[in-house]
Image (cartoon, grey):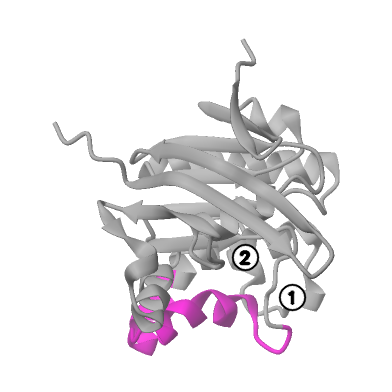
Amino acid sequence: MNNQPLLEVRNLWKSFSNKEYKIEILKGIDLKIFRGDTIAITGSSGVGKSTFLHILATLEKPTKGMVFYKGKDLFRLSSDALARFRNQKLGFVFQFHYLLPEFTALENVMLPALIAGWSEKKAREQAKGLLQEVGVYHRRNHRPGELSGGEQQRVAIARALVLEPELIWADEPTGNLDQNTAEKVQSLLFSLHKKTGITMIIATHNLRLASLFAICYELTGGQLIKRDFS
């Protein structure tokens, strides 16, 4: 059995500074993430949850420390190689959907696949299947402005999955939704995990949502503290 982590963080530090002050956000974090894990990162607003996720996803560089993917030091890769890694291996879901307003739901979901070099036919079929999976196929020809908040987030989730990534990063994915819609999006995420076994890492201040994940940490004082909801 291969016990190599899918993703591993070693001695991760992140600070922000100017001439007057220096703020340490992350202070020597170590973390191992294995294939199929569901992990929630909780913590109060401003503690660095989004920053931590962005570093894990190589969207931002740490001040010090390393992030490994299957044993490969990601921050030693070139910018082009990192961009390919993000495009092919990671799916992103944010608090705001970031759908392109001039494109339909179907076109928004197709876009990452087209960028990756898929044929239009293959991208379209994959996107259609995912929109069916997330329950908004009937809205495929509508633009984001014609969709409800929940529908927009479902389309964003489909877009995150179009290239069949190994990891899904979700940063407050239900933060802009009412409770009923948020619960539907939560159920969708776990249904997709159950079906595909995809690894999910989420940052949220919603403890009710966090308690549904197999592993939960609180980010406090620059460190990850394991939480137990049992």
Question: Is residue 228 visible from the viewing direction of this image?
Answer: yes
Image coordinates of residue 79 in percent, x first then y, are 41, 81
1 or 2: tag closer to the N-terminus: 1
| Residue 144 circle label | 1
Q: Could you tell whether 20 is left or right of 38 in the image?
A: right
Report the number of discs: 2
* Main secondary structure found in the magenta portion: helix
Q: Residues within 10 Å of mark 2 (few under 14, many from 20)?
A: many
Mark 1: which amino acid?
Answer: Pro
- Residue 125 among magenta residues: yes
Q: Which residues are magenta?
A: 101-126
Q: Quadrant of the N terminus?
A: top left
Residue closer to the observer: 162 or 218: 218
Is 206 within the magenta?
Answer: no
Horizontal arrangement in the rendering, residue 123 relative to residue 173 (left or right): left
Kindly give the residue lying farthest to the top in the view shown.
Answer: 230
From the top left corner, tell me how far across and down residue 220 is, in percent.
71, 34
Q: Which residue is mark 2?
A: 155
Per the rendering, the mark at residue 228 is none
